[in-house]
Image: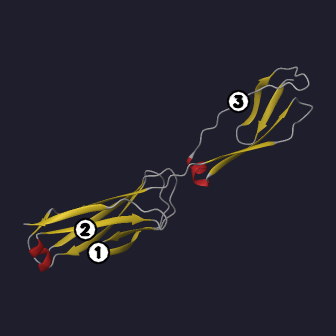
Amino acid sequence: GPFSVDDDIIGTLSNCAAGPLAPTASTTCTATYTIDQTDLDNGSVTNVASATDGTTTSPTDTVTVTVDALPALLVDKTADVTTYDAVGDVITYTYTITNDGNVTLAGPFSVDDDIIGTLSNCATGPLAPTASTTCTATYTIDQTDLDNGSVTNVASATDGTTTSNDSTVTVTVD
């Protein structure tokens, strides 16, 4: 001894043991590493280390810890009005897309709206966890909407791999 460990991520750990270390005996030292967003996005952390007493160096040992990736999208759809009263009134819908998971989503992001159709102009990406992006669309009231008494539509967001919840908004006739 003294014994130390050279770790490719953490650096040199010199607090392992003072020595001596008899044949077949062992000593243990520990270190911690805090996962960051890059590690989550990469899908794993691979760590390589070797031990030395200053003269003799061990073979390297490698450990890989994988990420429990939980991609998730959340969409919140709102309307700029709560009522309408004439043919030709316009409702502007705003769709807020939030990355509700633990990994960055590459995008591009789109919204599927059951009345308006697909909106592909939402964002190209990437979208980090807890980050949001918005897009808007308009809908023009027709006579059928007046006769029905309300307009209800449902939307969901996607990045092509992950699909959000459904968000529903109802605007009623005045």
Q: Which mark is residue 21?
A: none
Kindly report the distance in space between the C-alpha atoms of the residues bearing marks 3 and 1.
57 Å
Is label 2 in contact with label 1 (beta carbons under 8 Å)?
Answer: yes
Q: Quadrant of residue 146?
A: bottom left
Label 2's element? strand
Q: Assess disc 3: are there few (<14), some (14-19) or many (≥20) residues with their C-alpha within 10 Å of its C-alpha.
A: few
Sequence-wise, the earlier of marks 2 and 1 is: 1
* Outermost front residue: 24
Q: Nearer the viewer, mark 2 or mark 1?
A: 2
Kindly report the distance in space between the C-alpha atoms of the residues bearing marks 3 and 2.
56 Å
Q: Residue 88, how many percent across, how many down? A: 14, 78
Residue 124 in view: yes
- What amino acid type is highlighted by mark number 2? Asn
**Can you identify the residue that label 3 sits on?**
30
Label 1's element? loop
**Can you identify the residue that label 1 sits on?**
116
Is label 3 in contact with label 1 (beta carbons under 8 Å)?
Answer: no
Q: Is residue 118 above or below residue 74?
A: below
Left or right of residue 20, residue 127 in this image: left
Residue at horizontal 61 percent and vertical 49 percent from the top: 39
Label 3's element? loop
Kindly report the distance in space between the C-alpha atoms of the residues bearing marks 2 and 1.
9 Å
Q: Residue 80, how many percent across, how many down? A: 20, 63
- What amino acid type is highlighted by mark number 1? Ile
Sequence-wise, the earlier of marks 3 and 1 is: 3
Q: Assess disc 1: are there few (<14), some (14-19) or many (≥20) residues with their C-alpha within 10 Å of its C-alpha.
A: some
Q: Which mark is residue 153?
A: 2
Q: Is residue 98 above or below residue 137?
A: above
Q: How many marks?
A: 3
